[in-house]
Image (cartoon, coloured by chain):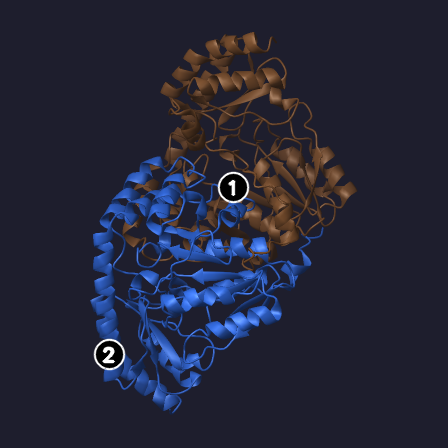
Chain colours: A brown, B blue
Amino acid sequence: MTGPRYTPLATSLPADVPFVGPEVQERDLGFAFRARLGANENPFGPSPHAVAALRRAADEVWKYSEATNHDLRHALATKMEAEPDQVIVGGGIDGLLGTLVRLTVAEGDAVVTSDGAYPTFNYHVNGFGGVLHKVPYRDDLEDLPALLAKAAETNAKLVYLSNPDNPMGTWHDAATIEAALDRIPNGTLLVLDEAYVEFAPAGTAPRIDPEDPRVMRFRTFSKAYGMAGARVGYGVGARSLVKSFDKVRDHFGMTRPSQEAALAAIGDDAWLGEVQEKVAAAKDRIDDIARANGLTPLPSAANFVTVDCGADGDFARAVLRALIARGVFVRMPFRPPQDRCIRFGAGLPEELDVLAAELPAALEEARAAAPA
Amino acid sequence: MTGPRYTPLATSLPADVPFVGPEVQERDLGFAFRARLGANENPFGPSPHAVAALRRAADEVWKYSEATNHDLRHALATKMEAEPDQVIVGGGIDGLLGTLVRLTVAEGDAVVTSDGAYPTFNYHVNGFGGVLHKVPYRDDLEDLPALLAKAAETNAKLVYLSNPDNPMGTWHDAATIEAALDRIPNGTLLVLDEAYVEFAPAGTAPRIDPEDPRVMRFRTFSKAYGMAGARVGYGVGARSLVKSFDKVRDHFGMTRPSQEAALAAIGDDAWLGEVQEKVAAAKDRIDDIARANGLTPLPSAANFVTVDCGADGDFARAVLRALIARGVFVRMPFRPPQDRCIRFGAGLPEELDVLAAELPAALEEARAAAPA
């Protein structure tokens, strides 16, 4: 009896997980986190209309979802000033990035990203055998000219930019992105991840013709719309590119309740406005907590604040461990010199109370362990 | 400005959809179906405990799902007499089949299935560049000895068997499957799709050691558990095979409400028993309707009855068209000679009333168009 024979590519891949979830950490630690600030979720949650739609949809969960996401695509097209056939809906930006990589990246193909940018994009590229070329951040910002130069140099199929950036929270303004479009190398697709754009200042989202063949932009209901657990993301791009997703996607893969909830959420701009205000207030509070402890918060256009702990990665990791041991779930950028920082999500007021109470002791412990 | 460059494989793929959903057909037709009997759904729906769990989970949808599906895997392990690390949870059997094919089938690799069996499996194999070798049905049953012989002949990576079979509803008993295990060629994995097994007679599900490296079995909450729109399927197999899914799967891809609903559904055997009875009654009614119209229902171990229309595929397609035009959503097997049949799902009593009322006229219209 022999087992299955894997592909050479599958055999070569590690069984790594891009992120270890908070529940797994809680099981390992033996206690529940008192502040869940590490997963870039939005604890202010979705519109009450979306919650009501989810509850109603429970009665129709025996039906498969509508495989073309018709109603949701039409509503998103209106919102995005695109046509419905320029919009693809999928299982979060994660799922859509996986499909895009599968469509474009064969084994050995070059892909460009920033060193320390979104790990799940890299996971997909590795998973299809692509070769990642990484460009350092410049002043804690994704270095757009260097990314495009590297794409030209490596003949990259894809170049990834998240704007605003995760994990740093920094951002380029619309004019910068728009000016960069003409510098995208022929045959390279700019993957513009706008997961956090609803939190950014006006003037961050570039105007891009959906039919522009050089770019595909991605957005999500996981962040500002407060529905990470519903797995709804969308992409906007040229008709031919959007159509190509139908070649390989899991057509009935969306859940019906999530489709209904997303549709209900789009219409509730008042709730979105409230969430934006609550997130802004939470970020101000994190800034204050950081400064009160002698740390430096970075400017952020996302729903988190990345805080410079003032020393090297070893010190920041010591702070992170001390916070986690005290029930504060946080994460940090992985790559130096950005790993001098810790990322704090815009949590509920009571969660930030926990952070304010625990950060001084965590810093003290870290300083004792790894003098800054 | 040039567009993205697709992989050669992606370029070669058609933008076909395995199934056109009923909502798409309704938009094209301009009316709503009065009987939804074509998608192998279960209109008796999920356990009230699952519905309640879905509603409760709306309040936690702002959180990402638990990426390891810990609680659900543990509950399924108990149910399946396996260990939790022998169970993988994913977005329906469709999603899990896609991942399994990705892990095992490289371009040019051979895969064996029955000619006319589940199209979504074929879609995944084509989508990763595998070469399908198809074996005819024998007496409307998947021909297990021929499938295994073809797997040996082609050095197949995978051989697919759905038991009970979709679209025919026929089945092998447990002893037949168990006896076949030792004839699986070295290096071939038997993909045992048991989506419908909860509807089958006792003695249909084979006893298979989860650690047996020659088989992976798949089950779902979409059919007997009435939650097709929640996208929860699971696979049971050897630890090393299950672990390999972590190399490429979308770790946070499950929705949180679906995880909670599935967990609640497992515990409600009383509801499952009621559904089994209702489905059995609906199948008896379909048998009666078929016979009253001079047609021959095939024995079925699934939640549908495949009915022999008594002539060739052209005639059955004419009946199908006439039924759809009369508001009865049904589907049929795609390949001759099985395409002489139409498949009727175990619908609600009022849906079967519609079928009973419309079938005579549909047959009359088909006989006028294509005399049998």
Compared with B206, A46 (above or below) is: above
Label 2 is found on which chain of the structure?
B
Residue corresponding to mark 2: B289
Q: For the image shown, how many numbered marks are present on the structure?
A: 2
The image position of residue A215, as x and y in percent, is 63, 46
Q: Position of residue A159 (x, y in %)?
A: 67, 41
Query: Horizontally, is B125 left or right of B337 in the view?
Result: right
Q: Is the residue B349 above or below the residue B72 in the image? A: below
Q: Nearer the viewer, mark 1 or mark 2?
A: 2
Can residue B17 be seen in the rendering of this structure? no
Residue at the limit of the structure toward the right, as seen here: A153
Give residue A232's quadrant in the image. top left
The amino acid on which the numbered mark 1 sits, given as a three-letter code, is: Arg
Say what amino acid the circle numbered 2 marks: Ile
Secondary element under disc 2, as helix, strand or loop, is helix
Q: Chain of mark 1?
A: A
Q: Which residue is mark 1?
A: A219
Where disc 1 sits, the SS reads: strand
Front residue of A77 and A18 = A18
Q: Residues within 10 Å of mark 1 (few under 14, many from 20)?
A: many
Quadrant in the picture for residue B319: bottom left
Horizontal side, residue A50 vs residue A214: left or right:
left
The answer to whether marks 1 and 2 mark residues whose Cβ atoms lie closer than 8 Å is no
Residue A225: give x, y in percent of width and height: 42, 37
Camera-side residue: B330 or A183?
A: B330
| Residue A359 vs residue B187, the one in the foreground | B187
Distance of label 1 from label 2 (alpha carbons) = 50 Å
Say which quadrant the C terminus of chain A sits in: top right
Q: Is residue A319 visible?
A: yes
